[in-house]
Amino acid sequence: MPVINRVAEMQEQVAEWRRHLHQNPELLYDVHETSRFVAEKLNSFGCDVVETGIGKTGVVGIIKGKHGDGPVIGFRADMDALPIFETSGKPWASKTPGKAHSCGHDGHTAMLLGAAQYLAETRNFKGSVAVIFQPAEEGGAGALAMIEDGFIDKFGINEVYGMHNEPRLAVGNFAIRKGGIMAAADVFEITVNGRGSHAAQPHNSIDPVLAASHIVIALQSIVSRETDPLKSLVVTVAAIHGGEANNVIPDTVKLVGTVRTLLPETRDFAQKRLTTVAEMTATVHGATADVVYRRGYPVTFNHEAETEFAIGIAGKVAGPKAVNGEVNPHMGAEDFSYMLEQRPGAFIFIGNGDTASLHNAAYDFNDEAIPYGVSYWVTLAETALAA
């Protein structure tokens, strides 16, 4: 089954929804207008249940098949935008300066709405489909908030599936892998405490700038000399703050950054070693280091059977040659990981073509991907819940 004819006919309508959302971006949990738009559409499609306010501003719609009771599978789309000044120049560019859909969540939401409309019209399956519209993926852990509100158990969801667009992957192509497909992302803050002095008298100081500089270098030894090269680890010091004058050695310097891993044991090891290396390196220079380490999104871990199933579905839509079932993992993070910790499922990438990268001010979702994304959701539902 290639792209579904009815879905192809829906493309312009779904694109209009997408462009409306693109013009009206909202951040994190403050997606009230987006949630209202989604809920209105789901109600107009005739969904059996439409519940709002889940995880603050999340929306879930339930579509029951016409062939009787059966399992419930969940499809998730994220709704929030980014705090970015858009430079795409598109006619449908953001109307709100400083907010933009620079990650394609407008496209994800529109495609899942398209699938919901089709499935509500046809209902050619047994069981139910839960369409899940989530706030606050961009750093707010909206998936976890929805889980804590109990939606998975309330609606009896057995499996969960997610999708994200991928620039530079050709439109009409999909990419996925078993196991870790996106990394766990943790953040750290290291405060190096020394003793300030006049720059002309460094011998009277305990220089936190020097100690911090050695810490930056030493942290990379965790990756290059202490971690199996086949077990991915990225340690990034992204910002250094310390001092204001050019002739004063400050009392403190602060380092902030991220740690990204694909395996739980690597994550535990990195946290322990980062703390030890920072503290001991500071001690060598007569300073001290206070380390704050906060765990963020866990690894997005695709379950084996569900990944094989998703590969087959993508192959039905795009053709087997257009599906990469062993794509390299991304070291970025994704909070759909929380849902995959609760239920088996799989997260897939869909091609967005030769566009600007994600989180780039010039980015725009490619509407040519819409028929493939909607057809993937529909085909997955009708196959998984075949009568």
Image (cartoon, rainbow, N blue to C red):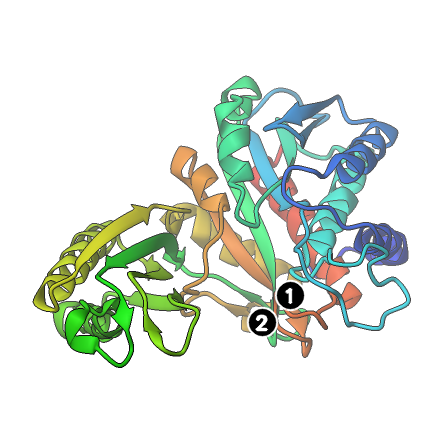
Q: Is residue 380 left or right of residue 20?
A: left
Are the residues tagged 2 and 1 within 8 Å (C-beta)?
yes
Residue 3, numbered circle: none
Q: Which residue is mark 2?
A: 322
Tally of numbered discs: 2
Image quarter hosting the C terminus: top right
Q: Secondary structure at mark 2?
A: helix
Q: Looking at the picture, does residue 131 appear above or below residue 78?
A: above
The residue that appears at 57% across and 50% down in the rendered structure is 138
**Does residue 224 appear in this view?**
no
For label 2, count other residues whose C-alpha is less than 10 Å away and answer few (under 14), some (14-19) or many (20+).
Answer: some
Q: Position of residue 175 (x, y in %)?
A: 52, 65
**Does residue 184 appear in this view?**
yes
Q: Position of residue 100 (x, y in %)?
A: 73, 58
Q: Amino acid at mark 2?
A: Ala
Place residue 331 in its image quadrant: bottom left
Q: Secondary structure at mark 1?
A: helix
Q: Looking at the picture, does residue 97 appear above or below residue 61?
A: below
The Cα–Cα distance between marks 2 and 1, rounded to whole angstroms, is 6 Å
Asked whether 53 or 120 is in front, the reply is 53
Q: Amino acid at mark 1?
A: Ala
Q: Which residue is mark 1?
A: 318
The residue that appears at 29% across and 48% down in the rendered structure is 292
The residue that appears at 18% across and 73% down in the rendered structure is 221
Place residue 101 in its image quadrant: bottom right
Place residue 315 in its image quadrant: bottom right
Image quarter hosting the N terminus: bottom right
Q: Position of residue 128 (x, y in %)?
A: 63, 28
